[in-house]
Image (spheres, rainbow, N blue to C red):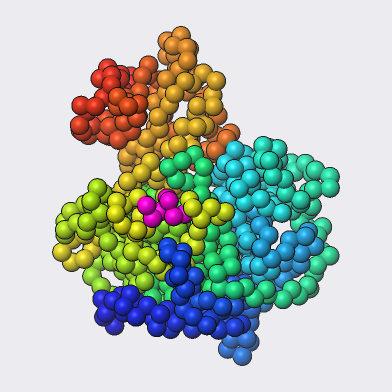
Amino acid sequence: MDYAAFHRRSLDERDAFWAEQARLIDWHVAPKRTLDYARPPFARWFVDGRTNLCHNAVDRWLNRDWGAHADRPALIYISTETGEERTYSFRALHAEVNRCAAMLLELGVGRGDRVLIYMPMIAEAAFAMLACARIGAIHSVVFGGFASHSLANRIEDAAPKVIVSADAGSRVGKVVPYKGLLDEAIRLSAHKPAKVLLVDRKLAAMPMTAGRDVRWDALAVRHEGAQVPCAWLESSEPSYILYTSGTTGRPKGVQRDTGGYAVALAASMKHIYCGNAGETYFSTSDIGWVVGHSYIIYGPLLAGMATIMYEGTPVRPDAGILWQIVEKHRVSVMFSAPTAIRVLKKQDPGYLTKYDLSSLKALWLAGEPLDEPTARWIADSLKRPIIDNYWQTETGWPILTYPMGIEDKPRKFGSPGHPMYGYDVRLLHEATGEEVAVGEKGVVAIVPPLPPGCMSTVWGDDRRFVETYFRSVPGREVYSTFDWGIRDADGCHFILGRTDDVINVAGHRLGTREIEESISSHPAIAEVAVVGVADQLKGQVPVGFAVVKDAAAVATLDGRMKLEGEVMKTVDGQLGAIARPHRVHFVSALPKTRSGKVLRRSIQAICEGRDPGDLTTIEDPAALTQLREAMAPA
Ligand code: AMP
């Protein structure tokens, strides 16, 4: 089919187009209207329709093929950290999810209540997410790599009735204790959960707080064989909250609806990922990120596919592990991030030819820019299409990619391709809001309404949703992605980086302000600026420049090293190791404009050896000299 016509129709005949896509899922009550856009920019999709994500992901598949599908794999849990591997058929997954739903009900969780899930990549995390969806509770998954301060912010904002967690995770063979961080986060938070449900993996100590903490295994035995009916939610009722970093220190709760999300994912499985019932999907992401929500848990299961939940890294026990999994489980659709591929590029290429990868249709990569050499290398090695897809936590599914299920358009290395159906993508001039010409750089914007599946609002803060996303391009009420982009004469887009202070480390989005706030909490630090600096492996890494209160503390190399170590420890303890700066340099002043604004882009340019741009407004040029010196090799 001609994709251009498909895309055009999705915008010109929006209602008819999405009404057709809505047939990809089961509705308990069919929608009365496709879109209610009476209160822009808030879009309500599939008005008055009633459905349930868990029903569509699990129950729906039990009767398929006269019941044969019930015994096909649904969830394949593989941990190279603990050596476990378990496969749950749709029937077994259904039983586990029902049981977990009964457990949550017993703990007092009802429709609309929040359940915070702070868990490693274990099967129970998937059960908990699906169980929430089943009873209409709103889950808020927090990435296990976040530490107590980040977690406390999220507990306070979402005010969960119950938190589901575990004793520990494991990374590269090292136990990562969760329970202590969780207890500390609850202590820091003004909101306290009524109950904490805990999986004991027996990896670390799990001290229990009487009256609050409940063991998963003890509660589970009491609900063996439970049957919990699905709550039929109105399409716009929230399914989940997922926090994401922005330009302020306070993360935003991206709120997603139910019906629009289900339809968007089901459509993407067909048109973009080409996944069919009975096949296997393997995403190497984590449930703590949007990819984990859309393409580990919901998307593949909505399509009746088996999904692999992988606790491990791409290089352990060796650099062939991902391909070994592909061969063993006949993976047809694989999703990963460019950083994982750059990691593999440094390993023995023999691993790429050692396994039978004939089941693989293509490899989809997202989360950060896919550089041309990496794309070319993996395409040559795998001899499979490599498909870049560009999207955000906010959108829930790709904004730009090559929709293989509709038309196998020619792909360009370095470009995530074309606007997806439903997205009216424009590249706009930052200052005038006018559309830029072919080959000119502009802000990637989407003319609302945003299509189904995109965020419905910021949790508890409609105003912030409008102000943050729809007011940044002068004179136009359009959604800003806060990314720079450029389009070539063939309509292929290229993403050139963020327009704001968000950085992307190995596909993980971090707000530099959050890191700055954490560093500033160290008693020796007076002021700090954090910027993202280009890194060959991770795309970007955070680098800090700090002014100390007492210069004597950093007068010697020993003093500097000691304080740098302490600052890093502070960030580790508050935000988690993923936010730890690569380096913290000590300077006596930060480059600022005369109005006191820190010149982050100039700092970043100097760190990357680029021209720092127009510096006529700088207050103290000596600050720049210092910065250059700090960056010079010792
Ligand atoms: P997140 O919300 O954490 O998924 O991060 C979204 C951001 O990651 C986007 O706004 C982009 O800056 C970046 N990003 C995601 N996918 C791509 C891609 N395929 N190419 C370039 N940048 C990407």
Q: Quadrant of residue 402?
A: bottom left
Which residue does the image show at 35% across and 72% down from the upper left? 421
The C terminus sits in image quarter: top left
Residue depicted at x 23% and y 51%: 432
In the depicted structure, whether residue 25 falls above or below residue 115: below
Q: Give the main secondary structure, helix, strand or loop, of the magenta stretch.
A: helix
Residue 113 lies, in percent from the top left, at 68, 60
Q: Residue furthest bottom?
A: 66
Q: Where is residue 372 shown, x and y percent of the image? A: 25, 54
Q: Left or right: 437 with respect to 622? A: left
In the rendered image, residue 165, in percent from the top left (x then y), is placed at 68, 51
Is residue 206 something one can see in this rendering? Answer: yes
Q: Which residues are magenta?
A: 465-471
Is residue 27 positioned above or below 587 on the image?
below
Q: Where is the N terminus found, in terms of image quarters?
A: bottom left
Residue drawn at 57 percent across, 35 percent down: 574
The front one of 497 and 629 is 497
* Closest to the observer, 219 or 244: 244
Residue at the image point whose x is 66% and y is 67% from the top: 136
> Is 34 contained in the magenta span?
no
Q: How many marks?
A: 0
Q: Toward the viewer: 325 or 218?
A: 218
Of residues 351 and 523, the one nearer the viewer is: 523
| Looking at the image, residue 8 lies above or below residue 356 | below
User: Which of the 4 quarters of the picture holds residue 171?
Assistant: top right
Residue 470 part of the magenta segment: yes
Q: Specify whether residue 173 is in view.
A: no
Quarter of the image where one finds residue 536? top left
- Residue 107 as seen in the image, left or right of residue 11: right
Query: Does residue 237 sit above or below 290 in this rendering?
Result: below
Residue 6, position in %: x, y? 31, 79
